[in-house]
Amino acid sequence: MSGELLYEGKAKQVYATDDPGRVVIRFKDDATAFNGVKRATVGGKGRINCAITAYLFDLVAREAGVAHHMVQKLDDERLLCERVEIVPVEVVVRNRVAGSFARRYGIHEGAALPQPLVEFFYKSDALDDPLMGEDVPVLLGWAKRWELQFMREATLAVNDVLLRFYGEHGIDLVDMKLEFGRQDGRLLLADELTPDGSRLWERSTGRKLDKDVFRRDLADLGETYRELARRVLGAV
Ligand code: 5GP
């Protein structure tokens, strides 16, 4: 099924298939932070991120009607996906103050925002993904106005579903980053839905069940992801 390696990112590889309209995405065991400056290999991470992504893509399609790029889960580490052109805009939705938002405004992490906040960042490793006002990607030709509007609404819809899903497992979805891709003039939710790109805090203790444990050296990443998978998927 997998052919030529088309692209290798920090946590995933993308392979060609016999169908030019489809690719295979393989989730790696590599963990990176701070734009690749900090690295580790974490056994089982690819399998867990693949399983969580596949489960959550199905969930958001079913419950929010958001179309995504996954066609089917092929095996433990690989998804068959529609081939898309990734929009170079990272869409972050925040339910609580954390991370770069807390640093930018000099406030403590943790407070709930009165409503979800959507922010757009330019997807550029070379520039460390700078924050953008909504006119910037339009004026610079990175996304159309309707695409930003669509991404904002789809992101809020995905956020609603995942807030509820994680909430049912006693976990607060603090924030997350989504990416979208173009295919035949429409936008599909793309990339992944994993604890690499979300902040997930256990409600009763505040324990972090996401990649911040690696970024901040708080706990073992493999054990943390296994615990998250046990909670939300049963077992992986
Ligand atoms: P922040 O802007 O606070 O650093 O990140 C907000 C949310 O988006 C967090 O859940 C974080 O994991 C996710 N995020 C932002 N940028 C990236 C990125 O480049 N890669 C990944 N994996 N997640 C990101």
Image (cartoon, rainbow, N blue to C red):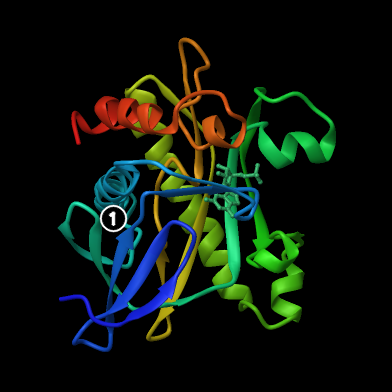
From what the image shows, is residue 119 above or below residue 143? Answer: above
Label 1 CB less than 8 angstroms from ligand 1: no
Q: Residue furthest top?
A: 204
Q: Quadrant of residue 105?
A: top right
Q: Looking at the image, how many numbered discs can be counted on the residues?
A: 1
Q: Residue 140's spot in the image, x, y percent? A: 74, 81
Tag 1 secondary structure: helix
Residue at 67% across, 23% down: 111
Q: Quadrant of the C terminus?
A: top left
Q: Quadrant of residue 102?
A: top right
User: Amino acid type of disc 1?
Assistant: Ala
Say which of 220 and 169 sits in front.
220
Q: Residue 88's spot in the image, x, y percent? A: 59, 71
Would you name the residue on which mark 1 appears?
Answer: 61
Q: Quadrant of the N terminus?
A: bottom left
Say which of 8 and 97 sits in front.
8
Residue at 42% across, 24% down: 171
Please state if 148 lies on the left or on the right of 235 as rendered. right
Disc 1 packing (10 Å; few <14; some 14–19; many ≥20): some
From what the image shows, is residue 23 above or below residue 132? Answer: below
Q: Residue 152's spot in the image, x, y percent? A: 56, 58
Residue at 58% across, 28% down: 217
Please state if 24 lies on the left or on the right of 125 as rendered. left
Q: Residue 127's spot in the image, x, y percent? A: 74, 65
From what the image shows, is residue 70 above or below residue 62? Answer: below
Please state if 191 lies on the left or on the right of 231 as rendered. right
Residue at 65% across, 23% down: 110
Please state if 194 lies on the left or on the right of 35 as rendered. left
